[in-house]
Image (cartoon, rainbow, N blue to C red):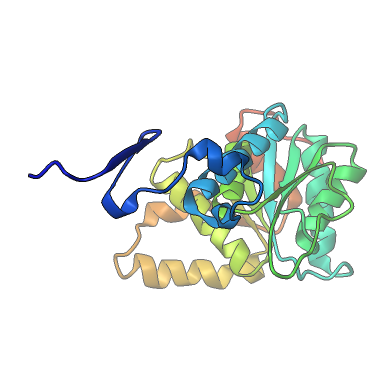
Amino acid sequence: MANNFRERLVGPVTRRRSQIQEGTTDQRLLDSAGPSDWLHQDPWRVLRIQSEFVEGFGALAELGPAVSVFGSARTPADSPEYKLGVEIGRALVEAGYAVITGGGPGAMEAANKGACEGGGVSVGLGIELPFEQGLNPYVDIGVNFRYFFVRKTMFVKYAKGFVVLPGGFGTLDELFEAITLVQTRKVTRFPVILVGTEYWGPLLDWIRGTLVAGGKASDTDLELVDCTDSVEHVMELLSRANGLPAPEGPFD
């Protein structure tokens, strides 16, 4: 092959022919009049992703045992589901867990409120969305993320269990990702607890009657999830999974 082409090494990257960029990396860094489109290129996004992991790990590394609570941002503050979320948040901190939510309103706010009023640690992991919500006022430690997958890592890494209140697509996303991680043994098994038998019952029936019946899932997969209406039962399941004595109720 002819050896008459140009070549330039840019760090670990080799550029040849038309892919050679004029100037040097230092020159582009220090030239204040240079273009800013590099902010939106993939190599820079990698650094942003890295920085989000670093910030998340740094903020939560000393959190201690925690439970992630999910649920709809649309849950009204005067609803029974909101009240249940407050009770769960309070019960969790009284049992020695920190409470992690998505930091938004509705069911997330309810769990954070219970944790805050119970004197425990209330964490909110927010996400950048077109319809900005901001962190609810009951969050003690808040981290806002650009990327969903970084945020999801934080939910799983620091949680001894998932408690899932009634919710929509976002809640279902977190629920099925948790089940998949446990099913595929990508994480050490932890309890995934659905709260609200009337709400979640039809979904479990569909899984049993369609997925399992059609050979797309197995009976043992259903054992990865528990469903209850009782705060006491939630705490019993968490305590049993984490080798702790079951706390005494009632939780109200």
Residue shown at 56%/45% (left/top)?
49
Question: Which residue ends up furthest to the front in the rendered image?
Answer: 4
Residue 4 screen position, x and y as percent: 16, 44
* Image-quadrant location for residue 169: bottom right
Q: Nearer the viewer, residue 133 or 13?
A: 13
Instruction: From this view, report whether residue 63 is shown above or below residue 205.
Output: above
Instruction: From this view, report whether residue 124 is shown above or below residue 212.
Output: above
Residue 220 screen position, x and y as percent: 39, 51
Question: Which residue ends up furthest to the left in the rendered image?
Answer: 1
Q: Nearer the viewer, residue 136 or 38?
A: 38
Residue 191 is at least partly visible in this image: no
Residue shown at 62%/34% (left/top)?
54
**The N terminus sits in image quarter:** top left
Q: Nearer the viewer, residue 202 or 33?
A: 33
Residue 51 placement, left or right of 42: right
Residue shown at 65%/70% (left/top)?
198
Residue 27 screen position, x and y as percent: 54, 39
Residue 211 placement, left or right of 250: left
* Image-quadrant location for residue 8: top left
Residue shown at 53%/70% (left/top)?
203
Residue 217 is at least partly visible in this image: yes
